[in-house]
Amino acid sequence: MTTDMPARMLRLLSLLQTRREWSGTELADRLSVTGRTVRRDIDRLRDLGYPVEGTTGHAGGYRLASGADMPPLLLDDDEAVALAVALRTAAGGLTGMEETSLRALAKLEQVLPQRLRGQVTALQESTATITWEARGPRVEPAILTVLAAACRDHEIVTFDYLTRTGDRAPRRVEPAHLVASGGLWYLLAHDTAKDDWRIYRLDRVTHPTPTGRRVPPRTTPGGDPAAYVTSKIATAPTRYRAVATVHAPAETVRARTWALADRIRPLDDNTCTLDASADTLPRIAQILTALDCDYTLDADTPVLDHLRTTADRALRATQ
């Protein structure tokens, strides 16, 4: 039995932070104490301001819930270093996170043990970052955190979604995974109305609302969320069509354009096709310019008009 109460309390708090819910029996076994001791220690945590909720029923137990204030967290060495580095680089693709990240980093570094502070300092001194002006769609941090919690807890959420046609439509889904790709965030979820898997861009999501209803986790199609989302993005409909036959090896084109693998099809060792279709004309022009080799193009009229205008502008600038 663990008789050192402060050590036991810290161990109990650490357990509550590592999993969504624990039964009283599981906690008692982990701490080598009785169920009565667990209940007393839970009450002590509540007195210290930790919002520990108790659930009833056959699967009842304890969970660390959200409260009015942020209580102290327990981090092991690797978690503390990872968090410090992540805060230093901030969160790409999120709106207004830079200043908040620096404030949180200052608080963390103030309490880091000296042995960890040296690791973090070494990483920071040997790493440089280039900050680019944000031009792509940005995601509100609150939206990301709500959906991340719903994925973790297998909780159904509702939200409004901006469709490709520009309309707002309500959605009710079972969130499964968040996937970041190409500066965008995607939610992979099972749509309850369509009874099928769907992918949603987070910059088009508004008003995500947890319903309080949890469901059993579903098996992701193919078993790999990132691979599934990648394959669907590559085949998703776009506003403008542009397919180039490129006089260069497929691997060369992939390295120059960073195009998804499913968008490039080798024809022979020195020729391939590239599907450069996109929702914006400048994006298509950017992809084609990155080829830096000869190609023929099969594209929609607006794409051809945009490329001619861009080329004429470039020629006038050189005269």
Image (cartoon, grey):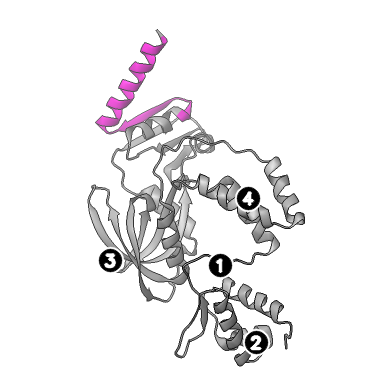
Image: magenta residue range = 290-318
- Is residue 213 depicted above or below 206 in this figure? below
Q: Residue 2: within the magenta?
A: no
Q: Residue 298: within the magenta?
A: yes
- Is residue 72 depicted above or below 101 in this figure? below
> Mark 3 touching mark 2, by CB under 8 A?
no
- Find the residue positioned furthest to the right: 115
Task: Give whichever of discs 2 and 1 has the lower sequence position.
Answer: 2
Residue 86 disc label = none
Task: Name the mark nearer the viewer: 3 or 1.
Answer: 1
Q: CA distance from mark 3 to mark 1?
A: 40 Å
Q: At numbered mark 3, what does the secondary structure look like: helix, strand or loop?
A: loop
Q: Where is mark 4, residue-wise?
A: 85
**Callout 4: few (<14), some (14-19), or many (20+) C-alpha neighbours within 10 Å?**
some
Under mark 4, the amino acid is Val
Task: Name the mark nearer the viewer: 4 or 1.
Answer: 1
Q: Residue at x 66, y 83 (%)?
A: 30
Q: Where is mark 2, residue-wise?
A: 29
- Find the residue positioned furthest to the top: 319
Task: Give whichever of discs 3 and 1 has the lower sequence position.
Answer: 1
Q: At numbered mark 4, what does the secondary structure look like: helix, strand or loop?
A: helix
Q: Where is mark 1, residue-wise?
A: 71
Query: Considering the image in quadrants, where does the C terminus appear?
Result: top left
